[in-house]
Amino acid sequence: MVVLKVQQREFSQVLKRVVKASSGPSIMEIYYTILFKYLPGEEKLLVTHTDTELGMQLKVPAEVEGDAEVLVPLQVVEVVSHIPDGPMCVRVKDSDDPKGQGIVVEALNHDIRYDLPYIADVSNFPELPEPEDPVEIQVPAARFHDALKKVEPSIAQDTGRPYLNGVYLETQTEKDKLYLTATDTRRLSHMEITAEGLDLEEDHQWIVPTEAVKLLLSELKEAGEDDRLTAVFGKNHLRFSLEDMMIHSRIIGAEYPNWRQFFPEKERNQVSVDRDALVKAVRRMKVLSDTVVLETTADLSQLCISVPQGEKGYAEEKLTTICDESMKLLADAKYLRDAIAPYPEDGVQLDVGGALDPIVIPELDGYSAILMPKRPD
C-alpha cells in the first residue's frame, strides 16, 4: 500500500499550478495524468505533469509510506480543491479491496472520501527530456519576468510561421547580456537584461515556445528581487528552475529573422510626449476605431490623436509635445498602446519617418520597440 500525507492547501495550489503545463488537447490518455514521486532525502513529493511538448515539476512537503511513485488521473486536481484545509492523504488501495483497485483521496480531520481510478503502469508516463550539450546561465528572476512581460505581446499568433511563435533568446560572446525579442512582422519588442555565468566561447540562440513563455510569466510573477532563475539550454530542449519549480520545454528548431535590421540607422524626426497621457488617449480613441491618426499641429507644439472619420463618429485629443518636424501617420491602436506602455520613463520618444516608415521607440533601460504604421485606405 502507498500512502501520501500532505496539507490540503499546499497540495491543491501545487496541483493547480502543475497542470498548466499543457500545449493543448491530446488524444493520448497518458497526457491526462500526474505523476507523484517521493524524494526521501528532502521529505517532499515531486509532482510532475507533461505532454512531452511542455512539462512542469513542483515539490510539496509530504510524508510517504510504501512505493515511491504513483500515477493518478487529472481529476484529482478538482477533487483535492474541494477537500477542507488541513491534513489529507492519497492512498493506493490494496488489490483485494472490496471496492476494486484505485486510489482513495480523503481528509484526515473530516469524514470525506473519494474513490478514483488508479493508473498502475507508471512506466508509461513520458520522461522529461534533459537538455543535450547544455548551456547554463542565471538571470534575476524578477527582471526576466519583467522582460518577458514586455516582449510577449509581440509574439506571432500565426501558426503558419512557427519560428515566430515564441520569444527569441540570444547571447553574444564577451557580453553579459541576454537578449529577448518577439515579433509578428507588424511589430517588434526587444529587451536586454544582465545575465550571470556567460563565459561562453560562441554565440547562442534559442526560440522559447509561446506556451512555455506563458507558463514562465505565471510562475515568476511573485519572484523576489534576490531570486535567481537558472536556465539550461540544449539543442532541442530547455529547462528553467527556481527553488522547488522546474519547467521543461522543447525549443523551436528554426532560424529567427535578423531583428536588428528592422531598426533604422539614420536619424529621423523625434516626437516626445507624456507616456501615460498618450496611452490613455489611444485607449479613448479605440472606443470608435482600431486605427488612430497621429498628427502634429502646424506650430509643432501639440500631437493630435484622432480616429479616421467613420460610421461610429469622430474623436480627437491633443497632447503637448516636442518634435523636430511635422508628421502624420496611422497606427493600430492596440499595437501602439502595447509598444509604449512598458516604456520605463514618464516621457516617451517616438522616432518617425514617412507615413509608411516604421515607428521606433528607442532603447531605454534595455527596452525598445518597433511598430509598422497602417496604410491609408
Image (spheres, rainbow, N blue to C red):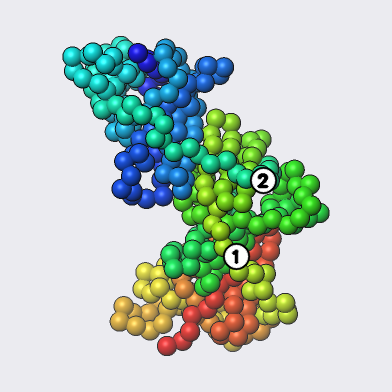
Question: Helix, strand or loop at disc 1?
Answer: loop
Residue at the disc numbered 1: 255
Task: Check the image and report above or below for 325 versus 359.
Answer: below
Q: Is residue 75 above or below residue 248?
A: above
Looking at the image, the residue that sits furthest to the right is 174
The answer, for residue 20, to whether it is visible in the render is yes
* Residue 133 - label: 2
The disc labelled 1 sits on which kind of residue? Glu
* Residue 81, image x, y percentages: 32, 29
Callout 1 environment at 10 Å: few (<14), some (14 to 19), or many (20+)? few
Q: Position of residue 365 (x, y in %)?
A: 69, 56
Is 229 rendered above or below residue 258?
above
Q: CB atoms at circles 2 and 1 under 8 Å apart?
A: no
Amino acid found under the numbered disc labelled 2: Asp
Q: Earlier in the sequence, mark 2 or mark 1?
A: 2
Q: Is residue 15 visible?
A: no
Q: Residue furthest left?
A: 98
Question: Does dot 2 land on a helix, a strand or a loop?
Answer: loop
